[in-house]
Image: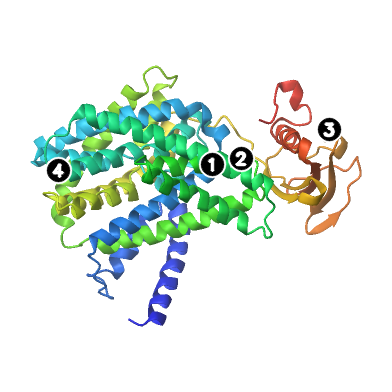
Amino acid sequence: MHLDLWLLLGATLVLCAIVAVRLSHQAGLPTLLAYMGLGLLIGESGPLHINFDDVELAETLGLAALVLILAEGGLTTSWRHVRKAVPAAISVSIVGTLVSIVVVGLAAMWLVGLDWRPAFLLAAVLAPTDAAAVFSVLRRLPLPSRLSGLLEAESGFNDAPVVIIVVTLSTHTGVPNLAELFGVMVYELAAGAIIGIVVGWLGAQGLRRVALPASGLYPIAVLSLSIGSYGAATLLHASGFLAVYVSAVVLGNARLPHRPATRGFAEGVGWLAQIGLFVMLGLLASPSELPRQIVPALVVGFVLLLIARPVSVVVSTIGFKMSWGEKLFASWAGLRGAVPIVLATIPMVQDVQSADRMFAIVFNIVVVFTLLQGPTLPLAAKWCRLESDEQTRELDVEAAPLEELHADLLEVRIPVDSMLSGVEIFELRLPPGASVTLIVRDGTSFVPEPTTPLHAGDTLLVVTTDAVRESTERRLRAVSRRGKLAGWFGEQGT
């Protein structure tokens, strides 16, 4: 095919994928199914007969796409939202992952007839939940912040330990030394987390002190820092996946210029990475091989869903305050997606016994159980009697540095359900050095009076000095959450 035909095909696929996002959103399904369906449609058995069987290239592109998806997930994660759930998420990501691998590995040996090495490789590949699937489905559900934070953080953390196990089992023919494997895992995870924190903190300090000539450079710089942390970690033989996620969380929650624009750019890059990744995985799958592995896939999938995942959640959350309803929902919400399929290419590259069969089993599990779990999550949340404890949306604050004036211009959009609606300007009680200079309402801008009431949907332009910018944002968030008497309720807008 000529270049112009490839470009036309690529543009058409992206547009079809965007339409699929809308359809999947209405059905409550992760969009990965539609993307993989597009890949199967144009693959070797489709009308275009595109034959893609380069496993090494698929592994490389898949890992690169996962880096971008993890970076997007970290940049759009609210630290305030997940902070309390991080200890439990780390436990589920490590202890829960190990429990799941043992249960699924034994089941794959006894029920499917795999040798120990491919059986435990299959279990390890299936252990991590998928960040793209979790973010696309769970962020639409009104769950308690502790539970949704746990599931989001888990999907960002659990890739790192699993990659270490999959690579070890794929590259070593004998039984691995468990003590050595544990030591390597501790080093890689600890070093990856430290590198992510350092890169994120240094990057945030630098971007706050340097005014770039164009606002569009900030999102590029932030995303480049996150990706750079992956490279730095891998060079030091640390966990690149953990480094990129941690650095993205640090950068995404830092007081940076044009923060909403950065999140929007990261989301766009993340969507593009998902589209390319899932379409490629659909191309890589062999439709003739998939039906032959549907029975083993169902057996392993139901063991994972009904036994391994619940046991791993219960064991790994011992000592953490979680209700049985939350544990039950967390067990059902362990969505699998691109991560297991990408990890299944590692044994194929290393020519591990039964690797092709393993890939087909994993592909079937992802498709079947995404169809089973995705649409039923709202019903599961209802049965578990889970309701959100946070009804008010967060303010969307855009900041642009005014370097020569040593000030910042904040653009604040008031959401529909914000308690800022009805509050008069003087009732905001902003700190000295901050002032609402302009209001944009229904497409018309005007300079407000002290007694001008705010309306839902307004956009405020607030000029603030560097010294009081943080306290200004906190006050605006506090009033948005609890109204003009937020201080009486102990709400500080943190």
- Mark 4 Cα-neighbour bin, 10 Å: few <14, some 14–19, many ≥20: many
The structure residue drawn at horizontal position 78% and vertical position 59%, both measured from the top left corner, is: 443
Q: CA distance from mark 2 to mark 4?
A: 43 Å
Mark 2 near mark 3, Cβ–Cβ under 8 Å? Answer: no
Mark 2 near mark 4, Cβ–Cβ under 8 Å? Answer: no
Which comes sooner in the sequence, label 2 or label 4?
4
Mark 2 sits on what residue? Answer: 254
Residue 233 is situated, as x and y percent measured from the top left of the image, at 40, 43
Residue type at numbered disc 1: Gly
- Image position of 82 with respect to 48: above or below: above
Residue type at numbered disc 4: Pro
- Mark 2 Cα-neighbour bin, 10 Å: few <14, some 14–19, many ≥20: some
The structure residue drawn at horizontal position 42% and vertical position 43%, both measured from the top left corner, is: 134
Side (left or right) of 358 relative to 93: left
Q: Quadrant of residue 480?
A: top right
Q: CA distance from mark 1 to mark 4?
A: 38 Å
Mark 4 sits on what residue? Answer: 118
Mark 3 near mark 1, Cβ–Cβ under 8 Å? Answer: no
Residue type at numbered disc 3: Arg
Q: Nearer the viewer, residue 229 or 304?
A: 229
Side (left or right) of 243 relative to 117: right
Task: For mark 2, give the secondary structure.
Answer: loop
Which comes sooner in the sequence, label 1 or label 4?
4
Which comes sooner in the sequence, label 3 or label 1?
1
The structure residue drawn at horizontal position 79% and vertical position 31%, both measured from the top left corner, is: 484
Mark yes or no: residue 252 visible: no
Mark 1 sits on what residue? Answer: 200
Mark 1 near mark 2, Cβ–Cβ under 8 Å? Answer: yes
